[in-house]
Image: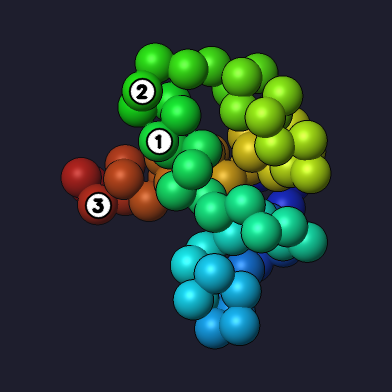
Amino acid sequence: MSQTVTNIITRDPDVLGGAPVFRGTRVPFQTLLDYLEGGQTLDDFLDDFPTVSRNFAISALEHAKLLVVNQLL
């Protein structure tokens, strides 16, 4: 992963009540997960939220995957 998660996702109590959002946007990371859970594609998400880069979305998902895998070890 080329970027740290803090470069990709940020929390600020003044932005959406402190929900984790993609840096520089008001788009919650949870929205990406909801899209994928609902059967939509990454491209669907990126089309609907053009302020989020493909690189940011993929890096965030990779980080989430590592957290889950490490919990199972």
Mark yes or no: residue 63 visible. no
- Circle 3 is placed at which residue position? 71
For marks 1 and 2, give the CA distance.
6 Å
Q: Amino acid at mark 2?
A: Gly
Q: Residues within 10 Å of mark 2 (few under 14, many from 20)?
A: few
- Circle 2 is placed at which residue position? 38
Residue at 51%, 38% in the rendered image: 32
For marks 3 and 1, give the CA distance.
21 Å
Q: In the picture, which quadrant includes the N terminus?
A: top right
Residue 23: image x %, image y %?
A: 72, 61
For numbered disc 1, what is the local secondary structure?
helix
Q: Amino acid at mark 1?
A: Asp
Q: Amino acid at mark 3?
A: Gln
> Who is closer to the viewer here, 70 or 16?
16
Q: Is residue 58 above or below residue 12?
A: above
Residue at 61%, 19% in the rendered image: 44
- Circle 1 is placed at which residue position? 34
Please name which of the two marks, 2 or 3, marks the residue nearer to the observer: 2
Is mark 3 in CB contact (under 8 Å) with mark 1?
no
Where residue 55 sits, quadrant-wise, is top right
For numbered disc 2, what is the local secondary structure?
loop
Q: Which circle's residue, 3 or 1, is located before the other in the chain?
A: 1
Is mark 2 in CB contact (under 8 Å) with mark 3?
no
Residue 15: image x %, image y %?
A: 61, 74
Please name which of the two marks, 3 or 1, marks the residue nearer to the observer: 1
Residue at 54%, 69% in the rendered image: 16
Q: Which circle's residue, 2 or 3, is located before the other in the chain?
A: 2
